[in-house]
Image: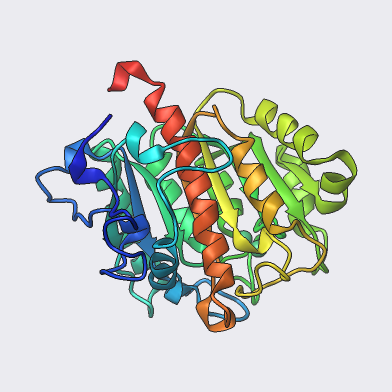
């Protein structure tokens, strides 16, 4: 597909440090734009961190990620994929949350994503803390539960925090399973590590059939073997990809609220996404980039590089669905 309107601004025409920084230098469109029906993938910011239980900051993520994303060029050097030639992409702006009210924020986010779904757009989200995934899944999985490939150093499967608080960035996928948004037998969590409170989260995973692949197993078996298993678990049915930047070792991604040492490097952070090529991905997010802890900006650059890899596999999938185009 070729449509000049949806081409990113090239660094060959305007230097990458110049211009208003939209996601990957794509056109910015609101949901009432007269070309909205032509958009295949919408890049969306959710500047919201009210679910954070420790060090905050991801509310500033989308703005910093947009700035860092101006570094991204049109072609994937590793795979040769040119996503903007395969599908139409646009920056759909930010969902405005209510930073003082979690339920109200979740309703606003879900309402926005329902409109995105109604327009036939596949969302690629920049968070926000990990609670962001729950209101997004409420829109995406309203008809049937999804599978999920989840990269994180935490399961985010706890029941509650502080004696009964149900909605934090440590609980989104517990709620998503309870609400029937995820099919737990088609959920795989990769990279889990660090000190924990107890086994309450992994006991729940076991009880419902979620596959948890700890980092020790990831390194012992190797990336290719682990991702091959993940692909079998989610199968060919609709699948969400949720990527917490703290999956990556804090040497490479220090700008996040809950870092855990002993993780994958930045090369492996990209490779795990490339290995998902061909899956039936119906949405994805990159969450937990916290600019106040990202003094070099390197975490945001890694974050948007992961988003570009996600976009490349999503573009391949969407472009290979002839019936829908
Ligand atoms: Mn997380
Ligand atoms: Mn995490």
Q: Quadrant of residue 209?
A: top right
Q: Quadrant of residue 155?
A: bottom right
Residue 173 at least partly seen: yes
Residue under the point 36% across and 64% down: 16
Q: Quadrant of ligand 2?
A: bottom right
- 24 or 112: which is nearer to us? 24
Left or right of 206 on screen, residue 287: left
Residue 171 placed where, x, y %?
60, 60
Q: Residue furthest left?
A: 34
Residue 300 placed where, x, y %?
52, 68
Left or right of 49 on screen, residue 120: left
Work out whether 195 lies above or below 143.
below
Q: Residue furthest top?
A: 323
Residue 131 placed where, x, y %?
51, 62
Q: How is the image coloured?
A: rainbow
Left or right of 142 on screen, residue 56: right
Residue under the point 70% across and 39% down: 208
Residue 165 at least partly seen: no
Work out whether 132 lies above or below 289.
above
- Tell me the quarter of the image containing the C terminus: top left
Q: Residue furthest front?
A: 12
- 294 or 235: which is nearer to us? 294
Q: Quadrant of residue 17?
A: bottom left
């Amino acid at each position: 597909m070729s449509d000049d309107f949806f081409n990113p601004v090239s660094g060959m025409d305007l230097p990458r440090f110049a211009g208003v920084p939209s996601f990957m230098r794509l056109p910015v469109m609101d949901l009432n734009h007269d070309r909205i029906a032509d958009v295949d993938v919408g890049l969306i910011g959710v500047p919201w961190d009210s679910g954070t239980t420790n060090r905050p900051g991801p509310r500033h993520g989308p703005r910093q990620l947009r700035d860092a994303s101006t570094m991204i060029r049109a072609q994937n050097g590793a795979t040769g994929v040119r996503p903007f030639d395969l599908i139409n992409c646009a920056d759909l702006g930010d969902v405005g949350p209510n930073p003082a009210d979690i339920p109200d924020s979740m309703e606003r986010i879900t309402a926005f994503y329902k409109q995105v779904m109604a327009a036939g757009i596949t969302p690629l989200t920049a968070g926000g803390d990990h609670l962001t995934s729950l209101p997004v899944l409420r829109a995406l999985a309203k008809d049937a539960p999804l599978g999920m490939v989840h990269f994180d150093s935490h399961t985010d499967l706890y029941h509650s925090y502080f004696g009964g608080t149900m909605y934090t960035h440590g609980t989104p996928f517990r709620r998503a399973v309870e609400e029937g948004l995820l099919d737990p037998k088609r959920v795989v969590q990769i990279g889990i590590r660090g000190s924990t409170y107890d086994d309450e989260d992994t006991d729940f995973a076991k009880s419902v059939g979620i596959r948890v692949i700890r980092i020790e197993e990831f390194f012992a078996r190797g990336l290719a073997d682990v991702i091959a298993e993940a692909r079998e678990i989610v199968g060919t049915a609709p699948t969400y990809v949720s990527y917490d930047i703290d999956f990556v070792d804090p040497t490479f991604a220090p700008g996040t609220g809950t870092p855990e040492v002993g993780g994958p490097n930045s090369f492996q952070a990209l490779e795990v996404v490339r290995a998902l090529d061909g899956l039936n991905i119906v949405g994805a997010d990159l969450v937990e980039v916290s600019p106040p802890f990202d003094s070099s900006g390197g975490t945001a650059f890694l974050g948007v590089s992961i988003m570009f890899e996600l976009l490349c596999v999503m573009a391949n999938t969407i472009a290979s669905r002839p019936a829908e185009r």
